[in-house]
Amino acid sequence: MRANAGELFWGEVVTSRQNPTVKRVCALLEKKARRREGLFRFDGIKLLCEAVKKRLQIELVVINEALEPSVKLRISELIGADGIDLGRVLCVSPQVFERISEEASPEGIITVAKIPARIHSRVDNAGDYFAEGRLLIVEAMRDPGNLGTVIRSALALGIDRLIISDDCADLYNPRTVRAAMGALFSLRIDTVGTEALPTLIKSLRASGREIYAAALTEDARKINEIRLREGDAFVIGNEGHGLSEAVIEASSGAVIIPMTEGSESLNAAAAAAICIWETVRA
């Protein structure tokens, strides 16, 4: 049944893990199912509120029966304020909810929403790529928590568009969504084929930008010693292996972040935040 402004109807309580809708929600933990259905899932009331605020299309809300009163109050306030249709609402037993939730301390709500194609898109022709505003480029960042944190930092600090290679962690992995804390619903993100990323970087450089690779090379300069102009950008790589040689060669040059003696390296998301700050400062 549907949840509309004014009144909410939970319908029958589902007590079986084999319920077709419950099985469908569980399947969305897998990337293949997310791509096939064009849907993704996330836990928590705060993320639901952000999704509604950003006008994502909500397909399903799953409620833990034991926490129904508090969840119902929060959602009623939300719907009463905005008149938003939440789509189908399914109430399940605590045992079923515990089996399908990804959270250690779940709030009693799981949302299924349509993937927001209007702000997240695939780059088909890297050679003709053009984008306005402040950019950050990410290659092969495979940890969902790191990628989500980068998305959150990028939006918070003023990046207009994120460009990621398709061997990064999935944008709609529940861990990515959780770490991004709602920023995923607002930030423009373009995905490009791994082999096409160097071509895209060259295209950006041809448009007048300088693109700097965050990489430890023989000729790398300290990030605070380069003169950034508005429109210049950085490429951040995999925390374990760094950037590919092809990406480094396609870039304008390499930069490093100065660290105190004895420090081995920075977390990839932390390094990205510093690069973002330098980009925005320019």
Image (cartoon, grey):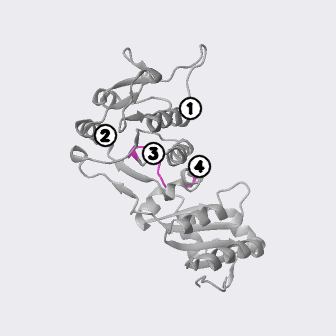
Stretch in magenta = 162-175
Give left or right: position of 126 versus 253.
left
Disc 3: CA contacts within 10 A as few (<14), some (14-19) or many (>=20): many
Query: CB atoms at circles 3 and 2 under 8 Å apart?
Result: no
- Identify the residue at horizontal 53%, vertical 54% (top origin): 183
Residue 71 locus on image (x, y percent): 72, 72
Say which label, 2 or 1, has the lower sequence index.
Answer: 2
According to the picture, the residue beneath numbered tag 3 turns out to be: 159
Name the kind of residue labelled 3 in the image.
Ile
Q: Dividing the image into 4 quarters, which one contains the C terminus?
A: top left
Name the kind of residue labelled 4 in the image.
Ala
Cα separation between marks 4 and 3: 17 Å
Relative to 132, does residue 43 appear above or below in the rendering?
A: below
- Identify the residue at horizontal 57%, vertical 69% (top origin): 23
Say which label, 4 or 3, has the lower sequence index.
Answer: 3
Is residue 223 shown in magenta? no
Q: Which mark is residue 179?
A: 4
Q: Which mark is residue 197?
A: 2
Relative to 136, does residue 226 appear above or below in the rendering?
A: above
Say which label, 1 or 3, has the lower sequence index.
Answer: 3
Query: CB atoms at circles 4 and 3 under 8 Å apart?
Result: no
Disc 4: CA contacts within 10 A as few (<14), some (14-19) or many (>=20): some
Relative to 268, does residue 48 appear above or below in the rendering?
A: below
- Identify the residue at horizontal 31%, vertical 27% (top origin): 252
